[in-house]
Image (cartoon, grey):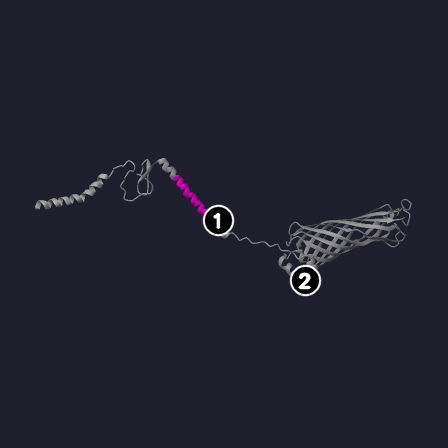
Amino acid sequence: MTSSLSFLIIAALMTLSLPTFAQTGLEGFSSGRYEVRKSKVPTKGRHPASEGEAGAVVTDSDGLKVRTLKASELAAEEKVRKEEEQKKLEEEKKQEAEKAAAVSAPKEVEVVEVQEPTISEQAESLFSSKAEKIYDFYREQIHPDDIRNNRVEIDLTPVVSYTDSQSNYSFRDYQSFFNALKIKSNVWFTPLIGVSGQIMFSLAADVDSLAADKSRIPAKYEFVDLGVNFRKFFGVSRKSSSVEFSVLYSDNKMTVPSDNTSRARLKSQGFGMGLKARIPTSANYSWVVGGTFFPRLQHTESATGAAISSGSPEESIRIGLDLGGEWKFTREGQMIWNLGLSAERNVFDGAAGLPDPSTGSTPSNVSVTNSLYMFSLGYRWGH
C-alpha cells in the first residue's frame, strides 16, 4: 500500500515536469524554412542582431526572420529613410510658410477707374443745379495742388519780339525789333470749360523808313486775342496730360504817325482755332506745345500822310506755333516760358495805289508775308 502511494506521487511529478522538458528540447530546432527564436517582445521592421555586428536581421511582426542585411545595405536604407523624413519636414515647413504668407499678405483691392465728368456734363451743369456736384467730384478726387482747381488765372509776361515783313511792294517791306508786355487771363466756369482774354502791346517800337537817310518811324503794335476754351485731361492725377481746344478771335494792329509817308497803318482781324497740349514730366514741370490757325482774316490798310494801298484785299491767312513750359511752385504760382512763331500771308488783287519808290513802277497783285518771332518769360497767378 505504501509502495503504490509512492509510485503515484512520482508519476504525478513526472507528468508536471514533462512540458518543460519538451519545450527545452525544441529550442534550436530548425524546420529548414524558418528559424525559431525565443523573444519576449515581438519585433517589427529591422533590428540589428547585436551592437557592432556586421549586419542586421529583418523579422516580421511575429518575430520570424525574413532577410539579413549587410551593414552597407542597412546604411543605404537608413539614408533613404532620413532623406524621406527630411523632405517631408521641408514640405511641411513650406506649407506652413505659404499659409503664414497668405494670412499676412494684404488683400487685393479691386481698382475702379475714376471717370472725370465729361465736357458735355460740365456744360449742362452751367445751366442747372449740377454745378456743385461737379466741384464736389474735384474736391474729392483731384489733388488740392492740381491746376484744375483754379477758377481764375492771370499771366504777366515780358516779351522780346522781332517782325519781318517781306513783300514785292516797298511800302510793305520792313523789319522791326521791339519789346512788349503780354497780359492774359483765364476764367474757368468749370474745370474743363472757360474763356480767356489776352493783350500784348509793344514798348518803344519802331520800323525802318523809306527815306534816303534810313530814319526810323515810331510804331505801336497791339495784339488782342479772345477765346472760348475746352480742356480734356487723361486721368485724375495732377501729372495727367491734357489737351485744350480754343475758338479764337484775333485783332492785330500796327499804328504809325498819321503824317508818315513811308508806312501804312495795318489791321488784321478774324476767327480761328487753337490747340494746345500740356505734358507733365513731373508734379512740378510740364511741357506745353500748341498752335493756332486763322483760315480767313480781314486785312486792311489805312492811309497816313500818303494814300498807300497794296490793292484790293483778296485773301489773308495766319498760322502760329508755340513751344513752352511751366514750372509749378504751387497751383497758385507758376513760372512760364514760351517760344512762338506766327506767319501771316496777305494777298491783294489789282494794281497798287502808289508807284513803288524803289522801282518807280506800280506793281499789281501784291503779296506780303509777315513773320513774327516772340520769346516770353513770365509768371502766372492762380486762384
Q: Residue at x 39, y 41 (%)?
A: 81
Residue 369 visible at all? yes
Residue 271 image offset from top left, x and y in percent = 79, 54
Residue 253 visible at all? no
Asked whether 275 falls inside the magenta stretch, the response is no
Q: Residue at x 23, y 39 (%)?
A: 26
Q: Tag 1: residue type?
A: Glu
Q: Quadrant of residue 45?
A: top left
Q: Residue at x 40, y 39 (%)?
A: 80
Residue 240 image offset from top left, x and y in percent = 65, 52
The residue labelled by disc 1 is 98
The residue labelled by disc 2 is 131
Task: Classify 351 as above or below 37.
Answer: below
Marks 1 and 2, the one that precedes in the sequence: 1
Q: Tag 2: residue type?
A: Ala
**From this viewpoint, which residue is outermost toward the bottom?**
129
Main SS type for the magenta part? helix
Label 1 to label 2: alpha-carbon separation: 52 Å
Residue 97 image offset from top left, x and y in percent = 47, 48
**From this viewpoint, which residue is outermost toward the left?**
1
Query: Which element carries disc 2, helix, strand or loop?
Result: helix
Q: Which residues are magenta?
A: 78-100
Residue 297 image offset from top left, x and y in percent = 81, 52
